[in-house]
Image (cartoon, rainbow, N blue to C red):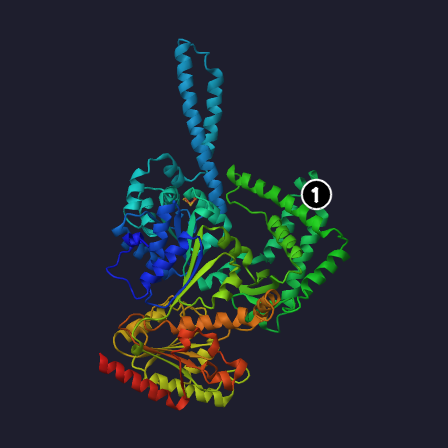
């Protein structure tokens, strides 16, 4: 087959497997297939996907979109597309959310109204210029008769008054984009691959809106770099396609870090309604009683309904707080269970419906439809108020939001795919609550995506097992599946599973277990030649073991709720200068993904325990939903497989190049190959892909120090 696509390949040579990967992907894209591509560090995944995708797109008149949810990856796409551009002049657009680019720092809704006013102003100015021309002509034709042009003059006066008013409430940055010749921007923009920061700088100097400038150029782009949000939010995706003048089947979609797609889609399709929205909903009705009554809305019933829901929500979350807990609540949301996660008895809704009936409301759904209709009317009214300058803030109808939420809640009350919860937190010294509908299986977002794009690629270092990935994301189209393990020299890494006590929930706090783990950690730290990263199941454990270990090295704790960047940079610095530091972190924190612990930054990574997420009711509901949809697979789909992916991500933090070296240590008997027989169903050895299993060596706790000593001695000799 012709390897025409190599004209986009910017490197002097391919990595091992890269050529084969590009060839398979190229063929799959021509066949409109979905590619599942797992590649360890060193596979060159980004170029392996971009090169064939750009070639196919150019041949078939398509466009390539590459999306990630990891900030650092976006930077890498920019750099790699710059390299491609040096070889072939492709046009690349980098997208970030409007809020990062708006010099006025206003929200989406406010921007929409300002835009309407701006375009209205431009149209009226055009109209006014035309009338002036006509007026001039009329005066000439009438030989400067004073009475001529009277009606045009009055039209002009009216128009000018409207223009003066609109000038108080338009967006000057957009105005300048709309009325200026932006060819110079276009030339500058596609000369290079521009970051949004560079665009903002250009726009700032010209008093223009960078976002609007960029939007106008999207129609020319061959490659768009964006984040998951641009794709998983269907409104944003529709806008993006509109700017590009493309439809979904014109897109070759690449998802990076695709193992995170399910949880990102879950966040997008879960809904929540704050208590304050309910409070404002009945205030909306009361404040607009005149309008509501004129149109014969059932004002009293609406007020009664939303007051009742608000009060019920508040009563429930307040009643669930223990004595003194209200004062101790953090400002992060805490879940309050209102529904049994397995059998889905929704106590909250049941009691709410009883109260609604007791209050004499017998047609709840019709009343909510009425509320939504009034809400829509009020929403238009608020928009007009802001547009006309009668209000200095664009209000949204909370009545509409509340009514729509509750209609959805009622419609999905017996749907296992949604799980209701209350959340409560303390903010600015006030208690805040909300109701949430967790989307347990977010297929409503992922299935349409994969069935409608021309072709898609999902890539990650941890995508397997593929059948599970396909089932969970609702992929039904033909796929090709490619997996490449680590290709760096085998001698440069040591992967051990320590045959220690399994850290079962009921055993992990036993003094004997804690003593054994502490001893092993001390051995690992002492015998590792450089920085050591230790990931625990929870922050609580990380903190506890940090206080137990005995080491001369600098020890850092990745504290919950505090940005880990500073700690991480300090940790890097120590390792890069040839010294030793330890960082104690937790598996579900921010240090296990998207961070490059290359060379001296990390010489050993330790995962203590299996690291299952907190098995709270939210997780149990997701497990029950998967069990319902895929009988017998609930635990694997919801808990086991995502956890092992997380462990593999953590293991992949060290050994980042062919010359890099390090140790990957799994500290729990359940990781060993021997556990398959000894611990049977509790073993997790089988949950790793075959290429990972081949490298895992079982080591007894007392021998860990010798394994590490030998390994680091060998590495020293080879240097
Ligand atoms: S048009 Fe641009 S500058 Fe104006 S409000 Fe919207 S994003 Fe901000």
Give the vertical position of 356 relative to 593 (above or below).
above
Q: Position of residue 218 (x, y in %)?
A: 38, 44
Residue 493 found in image quarter = bottom left
Q: Position of residue 452 (x, y in %)?
A: 49, 50
Residue 601 found in image quarter = bottom left
Q: Residues within 10 Å of mark 1 (few under 14, many from 20)?
A: some
| 432 relative position to 610: left or right | right
Please indicate, yes or no, whether residue 287 appears anywhere in the rendered image: no
Give the vertical position of 506 relative to 188 (above or below).
below
| Residue plotted at (25% across, 77% down) | 578
| 585 relative position to 475: left or right | left
Q: Position of residue 262 (x, y in %)?
A: 50, 62
In what quadrant does ligand 1 lie? top left
Give the vertical position of 175 relative to 359 (above or below).
above
| 548 relative position to 271: left or right | left
Give the vertical position of 189 relative to 437 (above or below).
above
| Residue plotted at (66% across, 55% down) | 411
Q: Position of residue 210 (x, y in %)?
A: 36, 45
* Residue indicated by mark 1: 297
Considering every residue shown, the one lying at the far front of the view is: 1
Please indicate, yes or no, whether residue 698 appears anywhere in the rendered image: yes
**656 or 135, which is in the foreground?**
656
User: The N terminus is located in which quarter?
Assistant: bottom left
**530 or 698, which is in the foreground?**
698
Residue 565 found in image quarter = bottom left
User: The C terminus is located in which quarter?
Assistant: bottom left
């Amino acid at each position: 087959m012709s390897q025409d696509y190599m004209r986009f390949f910017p490197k002097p040579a391919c990595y091992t497997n890269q050529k084969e990967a590009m060839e398979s992907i190229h063929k799959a894209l021509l066949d409109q297939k979905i590619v599942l591509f797992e590649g360890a560090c060193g596979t060159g995944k980004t170029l392996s996907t971009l090169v064939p995708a750009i070639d196919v797109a150019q041949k078939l008149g398509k466009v390539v979109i590459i999306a990630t949810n990891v900030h650092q990856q976006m930077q890498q796409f920019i750099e790699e597309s710059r390299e491609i551009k040096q070889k072939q002049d492709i046009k690349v657009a980098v997208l970030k959310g409007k809020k990062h680019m708006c010099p006025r720092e206003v929200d989406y809704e406010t921007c929409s109204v300002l835009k309407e006013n701006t375009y209205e102003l431009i149209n009226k100015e055009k109209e006014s210029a035309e009338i002036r021309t006509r007026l001039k002509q009329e005066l000439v034709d009438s030989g400067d008769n004073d009475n001529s042009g009277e009606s045009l003059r009055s039209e002009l006066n009216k128009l000018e008054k409207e223009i003066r008013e609109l000038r108080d409430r338009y967006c000057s940055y957009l105005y300048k984009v709309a009325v200026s010749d932006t060819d110079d921007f276009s030339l500058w923009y596609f000369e290079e691959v521009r970051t949004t920061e560079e665009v903002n700088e250009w726009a700032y100097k010209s008093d223009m809106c960078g976002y609007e400038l960029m939007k106008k150029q999207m129609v020319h782009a061959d490659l768009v770099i964006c984040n998951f949000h641009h794709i998983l939010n269907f409104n944003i995706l529709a806008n993006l396609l509109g700017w590009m003048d493309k439809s979904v089947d014109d897109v070759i979609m690449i998802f990076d870090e695709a193992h995170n797609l399910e949880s990102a889609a879950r966040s997008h399709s879960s809904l929540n309604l704050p208590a304050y929205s309910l409070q404002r909903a009945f205030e909306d009705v009361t404040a607009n009683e005149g309008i509501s009554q004129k149109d014969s809305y059932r004002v009293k019933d609406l007020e009664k309904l939303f007051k009742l829901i608000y009060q019920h929500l508040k009563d429930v979350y307040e009643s669930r707080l223990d004595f003194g807990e209200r004062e101790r609540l953090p400002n992060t949301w805490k879940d309050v269970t209102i529904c049994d996660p397995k059998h889905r008895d929704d106590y909250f809704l049941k009691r709410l419906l009883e109260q609604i009936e007791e209050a004499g409301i017998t047609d709840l759904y019709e009343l909510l439809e009425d509320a939504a209709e009034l809400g829509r009317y009020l929403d238009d009214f608020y928009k007009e108020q802001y547009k006309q300058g009668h209000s200095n803030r664009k209000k949204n109808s909370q009545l509409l939001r509340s009514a729509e939420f509750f209609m959805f809640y009622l419609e999905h009350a017996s749907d296992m795919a949604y799980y209701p919860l209350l959340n409560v937190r303390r903010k600015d010294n006030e208690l805040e609550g909300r109701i949430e509908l967790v989307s347990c299986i977010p297929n409503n977002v992922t299935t349409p995506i994969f069935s409608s794009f021309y072709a898609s690629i999902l890539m990650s270092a941890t995508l397997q097992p593929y059948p599970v990935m396909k089932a969970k994301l609702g992929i039904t189209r033909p796929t090709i599946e490619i997996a490449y393990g680590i290709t760096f020299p085998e001698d440069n890494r040591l992967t051990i599973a320590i045959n220690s006590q399994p850290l079962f929930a009921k055993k992990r706090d036993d003094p004997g277990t804690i003593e054994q783990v502490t001893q092993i950690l001390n051995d690992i730290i002492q015998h590792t030649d450089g920085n050591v990263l230790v990931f625990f199941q929870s922050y609580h454990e990380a903190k506890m073991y940090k206080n137990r270990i005995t080491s001369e090295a600098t020890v850092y704790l990745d504290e919950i709720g505090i940005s880990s960047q500073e700690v991480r940079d300090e940790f890097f610095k120590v390792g890069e200068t040839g010294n030793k530091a330890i960082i104690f972190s937790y598996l579900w924190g921010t240090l296990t993904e998207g961070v490059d612990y290359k060379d001296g930054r990390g010489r050993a990574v330790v995962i203590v325990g299996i690291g299952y997420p907190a098995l709270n009711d939210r997780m149990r509901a997701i497990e029950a939903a998967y069990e319902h949809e895929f009988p017998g697979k609930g635990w694997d789909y919801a808990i086991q497989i995502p956890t092992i992916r997380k462990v593999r991500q953590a293991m992949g933090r060290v050994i980042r190049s062919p010359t890099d070296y390090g140790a990957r240590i799994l500290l729990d008997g359940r990781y060993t190959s021997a556990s398959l027989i000894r611990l049977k169903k509790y073993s997790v050895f089988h949950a790793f892909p075959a290429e990972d299993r081949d490298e895992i060596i079982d080591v007894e706790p007392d021998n860990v120090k010798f394994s590490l000593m030998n390994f680091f001695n060998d590495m020293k000799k080879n240097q």
